[in-house]
Image: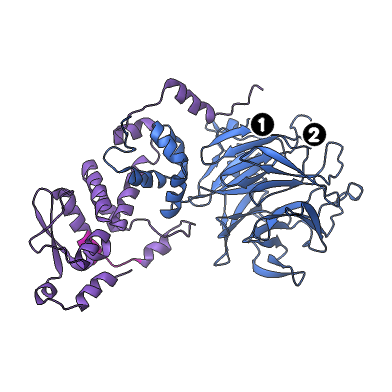
Chain colours: A blue, B purple
Amino acid sequence: MEHVELIPGIPDDVAVDCLARVPHASHRALRRVCRGWRSAAAAPSFASARAAAGANEDLVYMLQFGNPSADEGPKDGESPANTPAYGVAVYNVTSGEWRRERGAPPVIPVFAQCAAVGTRVAVLGGWDPRTFEPVADVHVLDASTGSWRRGAPMRSARSFFACAEAGGKIYVAGGHDKHKNALKTAEAYDAVADAWDPLPDMSEERDECDGMATVAGDRFLAVSGYRTARQGGFERDAEWFDPAARAWRRLERVRAPPSAAHVVVKGRVWCIEGNAVMEWISPRRGWREVGPYPPGLKAGTARAVCVGGGEKVVVTGALDGEGGGGRHALWVFDVKTKKWTVVRPPPEFAGFVFSVASVRI
Amino acid sequence: MEVDKGKGEAEETRKVAEADRDTVTLKSSDGKLFEVSKEAAARLSTVLAGMIAGGSIDDNGTDLKQIGSEALENVVDYCNKHANSIPSAALISSSISFNTAPFKEPEEWERKFVDRLSHDALFDLVEAANFLGMERLLDVTCHKISEMMKGKSPDQIREVFNIKNDYTKEELEEIRQELAWAFYDD
């Protein structure tokens, strides 16, 4: 068969370099041009050409409630259908653009959570929006192709659980079932194989615990949470999963003040709380300050995610005080300069964000 | 910015005749001659740097049989403009990009340089830059081509780049499906 040039008149490797520089928002169109472009955009060389050309974009995926005051403005006739009660919003940290995720499931379980591994974003658990019962549903987006698939369900239906990517797998642990019983069960998802690995139980029930990856990104840590009998009585302990021994290990007294948002930056546990950004120093079993508190962020509303392999931290939360008016915003922390940039989203993206994940494309 | 090759050459005062010349003469496939700064040529093109270092530069015009006169004129023009431009730190600070990847956005004058080219001239320049190992010029031209794809429909892209739609109806439907939520009815 005769070789068809990707772009007539240009060597194929140079053509890939041209395609790779096109912003992510136009990739959908690129894939539909012809067979050659579609396979070129899916090849590993496309991803490496983007990195080499400095064309990478960081996308933050948010599971977000609709903003009740967004409908007060003038309507253009199309917006109501685009603002679901709970849906997937995307903020492009690189370009500053906001959008709704096209092709997302029509109904996202309320309080579903998300985590990313590679270019895949998994949406897990939450409540059935009609019965308010926890579900075991999993939906997976491949952010590089824009395609969504239903994933293998979790072993247990759960909501308000710890959830994070660690060592290439997405871990879920704790939360509560439909009887509001706190769970000690945990499992790990392989997004490529679409398979769940049932893990041994944690030592404690942990409802509303925080999940994160730590120690070189390969260990999953479930922080705090409360037992069924101690509703809202958050514990100060945590446990992490040791994949080699397939066992949970306990850590005592790691929890920062209640309602802290945890995030792992280059293997270190950070916490957005009180007056500052704090970092956990494990030999000293204590916290040290690494940066100022996000300006105008209302206490106890933050969700945080690490972006671009540790260059940025993105925090979502409510705006405090006057002028905030219950509106939510986004704060971008530059790890190098230790400066916060406040991003005010368009009204339709100013709802409460319950879960965040980040992907580099 | 690296300027090692050009300076290294200048320090070596082997031949008086060579040292006199701070330009090299390049000859296009259609026999036209162009003069370009030796320093800029060596700095911007790995192929020309190799030829200069290896002494395979012909004073009467080094044959570049793969490059037509219009493309070569643009190459030489680019080299001369580049030699005169002051690297601009202001551009880096004005970038709103959050990326910390190597800064490869074209500078203002580079943008203007490629913007004035016709479609064919741009493509010929890409080929010439690729042949001569001119990484920066390749960056700038590839960036320009990527901008021609940005925000366009597949139909518009095919038209601009003269690409045949080789999808079957079934394949197009498959692609459409993969982008729509397929689980409405289960």
Label 1: how many residues lie within 10 Å, few (<14), some (14-19) or many (20+)?
few
Q: Nearer the viewer, residue A116 or A77?
A: A116
Instruction: Give the residue pinned by disc 2.
Output: A133
| Image quadrant containing the N terminus of chain B | bottom left
Chain part drawn in magenta: B79-88
Observer able to see residue A67: no
The answer to whether residue A56 is magenta is no
Query: What's the residue type where badge 2 is placed?
Result: Glu
Measure the alpha-carbon separation of dots 2 and 1: 14 Å
Q: Residue at x 50, y 25 (%)?
A: B174
Q: Is residue A56 left or right of residue B19?
A: right
Tag 2 secondary structure: loop
Instruction: Give the residue pinned by disc 1.
Output: A107
Q: Residue A240: image x %, image y %? A: 76, 56
Query: What's the residue type where badge 1 is placed?
Result: Val
| Image label count | 2
- Per the rendering, the mark at residue A277 is none
Which image quarter: residue B172? top left
Task: State if disc 1 and disc 2 touch (CB < 8 Å).
Answer: no
The answer to whether residue B85 is magenta is yes
Q: Residue at x 40, y 31 (%)?
A: A35
Which chain is disc 2 placed on? A
- Residue A84 vertical placement versus A290 (above, below): above
Q: Residue at x 74, y 32 (%)?
A: A129
Q: Residue at x 68, y 38 (%)?
A: A195
Q: Is residue A133 left or right of residue B10?
A: right
